[in-house]
Image: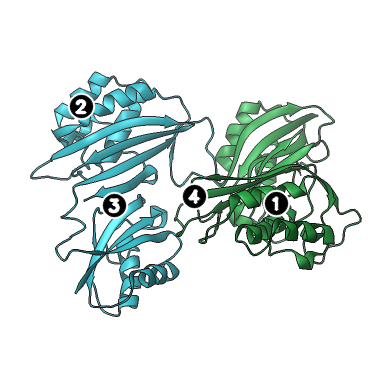
Chain colours: A cyan, B green
Amino acid sequence: MRNISLIVSYDGTNYHGWQCQPELITVQQTLQERIEKIVNHHIKLFAGARTDSGVHAYGQTVNFLTSSTIELKGLTRGLNSLLPPDIRISHAGEADRNFHSRYSAKSKIYIYSILNSAYNTPFYTRYVWHIPYSLNVLSMNRTVKLITGAHDFSAFKKKDTLYQNPIREVLQAGVKKRGDFIYVVIEGAGFLRYMVRNIVGTLMLVGSGKLTENDFRVILESKEREKAGPTAPAKGLFLRRIKY
Amino acid sequence: MRNISLIVSYDGTNYHGWQCQPELITVQQTLQERIEKIVNHHIKLFAGARTDSGVHAYGQTVNFLTSSTIELKGLTRGLNSLLPPDIRISHAGEADRNFHSRYSAKSKIYIYSILNSAYNTPFYTRYVWHIPYSLNVLSMNRTVKLITGAHDFSAFKKKDTLYQNPIREVLQAGVKKRGDFIYVVIEGAGFLRYMVRNIVGTLMLVGSGKLTENDFRVILESKEREKAGPTAPAKGLFLRRIKY
């Protein structure tokens, strides 16, 4: 059996997230069906990160075992011709037999995109959170550094979810401005569900002056979801890359 | 009566071009209906350029006469809340009574976007012509300069159209590369229909080595549409800006 890994990018707008769900169109199901058509047998498809509904991926990594002898180039071309244009394969490789896109992952990089301008443009609406009032990027950048290291991230979890272990390790975090765009970049060994979007939602309150850097620290340390800001919309979030 | 001008950007994907046509959804009709709802009377809406079906605009200029006393800020906000997200107003201004977005225009700048990479990405599919083989940008840039000045552009007109005067003046033209993207930029005092897309389609044959710079010159001078290359797809074309 070969263990094949793929780098996949997708526009999550029209999908109910990565993971297969009965009656709903997901990226996993869409991709798995096309792979099965090509390799001609059922497969199990694993992904480095299970992105939520509406979230995009620039570099998701997936893998599957197959008995097919198809060449990697032919596989990539075949998949790109069978897949809808909002899912693209940019790379296919042969992986070690014990490589697992989820369990072998060392870290994941997420980027959250904000368009900070008076008016939205028609070309980015599906990929940014549009904020028409001005944001203090320096103070957002200082504040987001507070999440680096290992923390109990319960304050930024999805409401009404229970974790046996809500501690996750953030390797680096920063906020940068490029023209009218503001990007929040977070690299972590693991994430709670909605964690990035809840951090961004709270960080926006710092950027607009409603909260101070110290308020953010108090919220993180409180471990109470109710204290934090709103969940930033899914459409601004990109899974940038998974490191192995 | 006030003469109000607007800067409009739109994603042309879902529209049958700018100009009103019976039974078809166009940008003009969509915008005009929203303006009429706000000013509360019928208007005539003029545009600097009548973009074709599927073509985008980053900075289209339009104008209309109105007896309404609405403030410009309120007009912009009102329109942006009534319009679908693929049409946005970025500016509203009071124009001289004799300003006409079409007849007062000095020049128009069009940009054609090409994604020149082995694989397409899901995020730009609606805005680029994806070319997977490598293109010679230097030779495309040298060649496109041949169109500057006043020329009979019949070789690049829409098939089966007749012009009394097919001479148009191009003020500047260039091709530049930015990462995997290649942009063809053409500024002209006027354009024949499909002219930019036919120039780009022919320029691609130069970029891929199928035609030389001199072949392009011969095609331009022949004034025969049959000699030129294919029409580049509408989705890569942006009306960038109109100069007055």
Given residues A170 and B147, the one toward you in this image is B147
Residue B202 image-quadrant placement: bottom right
Mark 3 highlights which residue?
A51
Label 2 and label 1: CA atoms lie apart by 60 Å
- Single out the mark in the foreground, 1 or 3: 1
Residue B49: image location, x then y, percent: 74, 45
Q: Amino acid at mark 2?
A: Ile
Mark 1 highlights which residue?
B143
Q: Amino acid at mark 1?
A: Thr
Residue B155: image location, x then y, percent: 80, 60
Chain label for disc 4 = B
Q: Is residue B10 left or right of residue A86?
A: right
Residue B99: image location, x then y, percent: 81, 32
Q: Secondary structure at mark 2?
A: helix
Q: Are marks 3 and 4 on the same chain?
A: no
Mark 4 highlights which residue?
B180
Label 4 and label 2: CA atoms lie apart by 42 Å
